Image: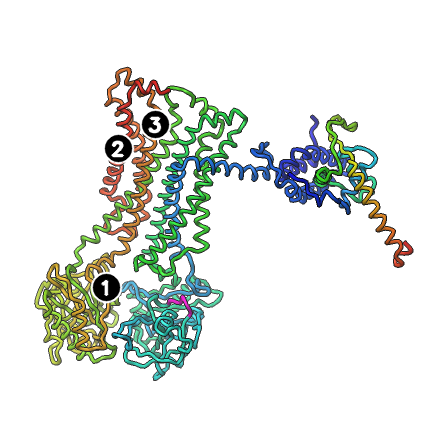
Amino acid sequence: MKRLPLSVRFPLAVYRTLAGLMPRRFRCEWLSDAERDLERTLAATRATRGSRAAWTEGIRAALDLVARIPAEWWAARGGRGRGARSDGLGWGDGIMSWLIELRQAARALARRPGFSGAAVLTLALGIGANVAIFAVVNTVLLRPLPYPDSDRIVALRHHAPGLDLPELESSQGMQNFYREDADFFAALAAFGTPDRNLVGGPRPERVELGAVTPEIFDVLRVQPVMGRPFNQGDVAEGAAPVVLLMDAAWRSRFGSDPDVVGRTIELDGVVTEIVGVMPRGFAFPSVGAVALEPMRIDPHGPFGTFGLPAIARIADGLSVADAQSRATELQARIPEYFPDLTAEFLRQAGWTVTVQRFQDRIVGKDVADALWIVLGTVGVVLLIACANVANLFLVRAESRQKELAVRAAMGAGVWRIAAGFLAEAVLLGVAGGALGVAFAWAGIELLAANGPAALPRVHELGMDATTFGFASALSVVTALTLGAFPLVRYGGGRLARALRDGGRGTTDGRARHRTRNVLVAGQLALALVLLVGSGLMLRSFQALRTIDPGFDGRDVLTVGMSLVEGADNAEAARFHQEVADRVATLPGILDVGLTSLVPLGRGSANGGSFYVEGIERSDEELPPVSMYKVIAADYLASMGQELLEGRTLDRDDWQDGAAPVMLVNASFRDRFLGGEALGKGIRWDEEGTYARIVGVVADARERSIREAPGPWAYLPMRVADWGYPNLSWMYVLVRSAPGVAVPVEAIREIVTELDPTVPITSVRSMQEVTAAAIAGTSFTMVLLAIAAGVALFLGAVGLFGVISYVVSQRTREIGVRVALGAKREDIRGLVFQQGAWVAASGVVLGLGGAAALTRLMRSVLFQVSPVDPISFVVAPALLLVVAVSATWLPARRASRVDPVVALRAE
Amino acid sequence: MSPRPSRRSSPIPLKPVWFHILLALADGARHGFSIREAVEKRTDGAVRLWPATLYGSMRDLSDAGLVEALEGEDDPDDDQRRRYYRLTPRGRDALRGETDRLQALVDAARATRALGSV
């Protein structure tokens, strides 16, 4: 045949391809005529007017074809025949035949509810877990904070590693410094979360407030829905006290009163005017805050006392990195602004600043790491679920061989048959996805209600468009993955061989089991990775649990009491001591202590630099720094903290006129005092009286269970006289005899009797406090353990299914063997061997995978190496035990095959 | 499938393309390409029937019962078998009816004073 020129051939090819979009009727009846006409026209045009004209004609013809498609489909609607023949051309027809294929698949699945139910449920578990965890990741890590342009909101942190102070917030002085010089911030604000006594309800109440500088409204770009924001007048000296109510408080406490602006509430005994209401969903600085109060920054505030969180909005046109570099440059000018600081001091302190996205600051790296690990874990579970369903699929495909053979014999191509599987896979994937979303929904509700308090932004948790998109994408990918397995099996001409193989032979072809064996080995390997991971978490958790915190929290209850701030310290001290004394008389109470800070509890610790009597310190030298807290009554006894040397503090130590004394811990003694502490004098100011060290206590983990304890000082209640922490906020620590419940109501009565305006708050056992301190680890551990359990279960089911299937296929062969004299043990061994091979391959693969992947977990592990030998031995052993059990049943069945029955069966 | 009476009852006014095709078939059966050539020739190339439009219209016209296909007539121009089409009586009626309708239009236009000189 004579070869056509390109200017004819190419438009024709395009035309033919596009014609695939036409309905079948058009293609069958008219397309060949149309193509022949076009070829003739193009050839003629080329001959008379050149190839350029032919190209143009070709394009116009193609456009004409496309324009005609809707009309042809409209005309073709309704008159469809069933089981349309595919000639490999028609996309449009493809769509129609796909619908038919899907309908057939739906019928086929409905005929086998057991298979379909198992597959859908398995997929739903896998998809549901992924969607639920993704929703958490999306909410906590990905979704921007609910403020306009929230990416431009940053947090400021300072660092002075040279002073043993790795993480510092900002300070009043630094706020003034930045406000004056940092033009790279469009707005800069500071905030805090003070607690206030709210009087007026049935009993005095301790509520959380947000204290914010007026600039916060520019930083967050949020305005009150009612009333006005704070202004500079509200923070002027002598300004009338005002608050802005949060939406929830406005609804619950003021019954959504539309005239609430102008009404008053009493906070810490001060009558305060309500000037507005914040919008719904506004949860800054914390979810629990009931109102905002204005925060005043002292224009002459000092450089030090870094307890003030700072937040800023970056100026337009600058990036976070720009702001970071500009802020770093600016630090060099601190000595100009604070004349008593030298550049040398800053250098020794290792002074730096970090400008960090506020969102990252809120979430924190630990949580982010844990969430990504959990998401990866549930992803692995989904893989295993897919492998399991794929195996079910393959088994089903084998059992359908007769039907497939008939279809193939009647002219159905490989792709046609594969399309049938794909249709089933799509239906299963979609059904599994829908059910999975329902599971995820339930899981998210559960998590939002009971999630660990340590999980930030948990109150925002919910399904959104992104999560739905993720769920849909996941279902589609799952379906395509499932559908691909039969393709692998039957693609590339393997169908005929498979069908030939599948006749009435004696034993299945060896190759037929390979795909399934590989799948099961893969499942076991993945399950092993998760097992090792959860083993590592378990070991971390154990390490955290068994660590000696330096105190004994068993049978200890902590009860917070808060006096009105600004109360006289001597009076406060007497009040607390009186409470402790009265509580000690309650039955079953062994020891009662008082402290300003519960070990591992919430609340910020105090610390500062100090001077040691007799040791001169040059200006250039860095001062020693220690944390401190106030203790009183029988603190050491109530906490079970050991006294190493000297004596403990007693009630005379806080009385007026008593000589100032203090305790230090062993770290303090060894680091700063050369091992000799008793009798040394310490003062926290350059001027003033030295306090004598009268005792040394054992180190206790006060701030974090993970970190080794640093130097701590324990001060009597009169330290407040020196301007250090005021005593309005103290905890009573009550150690009861084992098994005796501490009468919380009796304690409340004692407090109310002494002062009816003092609320009791945060009643928690020390065990709860400790559990909260390791909540992040236990949360990750529990999720990983659940995932690993599910993975192991699915893996075992997969192995069981495959071995059972093999046994059922080999019944005839086994019958022959038994008839020829094989012993039952031999048969059992034969089957076991096959299971063992699969399991062993899984273990080898899994160990490799675990070794490669567990290093990603390093940041969430505690005192455990990512290649912890125990986890790497126990987990495979557990897997092998489960694998052997999964093989045992089918092996037993094989060994009981009756040769007569087996041979008669076919 | 039941016929759609509304469409069957009156194809008039005819689509211009249909009119051209019916006209091309008025003096005897033709195959597709020949219809196309005839239309192009009659209109001096102003109306070009691209293949999809042509055969789509042929399908429309057969559905409407205005033309019918004759299988298996040889095309004298090439050695391939082609499908020939011819007018049905209904098609002939439609062609006549449309011509009358156009004629009436033209008469009306000529009778208008604004176009009197045309």
Q: Which amino acid is tagged 2?
A: Val
Report x, y in % for residue A694. 10, 70
Q: As rendered, which of A141 and A33 lies closer to the eye?
A: A33
Residue A216: image tag: none
Chain name for mark 3 = A
Q: Is residue A185 left or right of residue A876?
A: right
* N-terminal label among 3 and 1: 1
Q: Is residue A331 visible?
A: no
| Contact (Cβ within 8 Å) of mark 3 with mark 1 | no
Q: Position of residue A680 (x, y in %)?
A: 12, 70
Q: Which residue is mark 2?
A: A884
Q: Are marks 2 and 3 on the same chain?
A: yes
Quadrant holding the N terminus of chain A: top right
The stretch in magenta equals A279-283
**Within 10 Å of the Cα at label 1, are there few (<14), some (14-19), or many (20+) other Cα atoms?**
some
Q: Please give left or right for residue A613 compared with residue A868 in the image.
A: left
State the SS at label 1: loop
The chain that hosts pointer 2 is A
Marks 3/1: CA–CA distance = 59 Å
Q: Is residue A430 visible?
A: yes
Give the labeled residue for mark 1: A601
Quarter location, residue A678? bottom left
Question: Where A772 sits versus A65, above or below?
Answer: below
Main SS, magenta residues: loop
* Residue matched to label 3: A806
Quarter of the picture holding the C terminus of chain A: top left
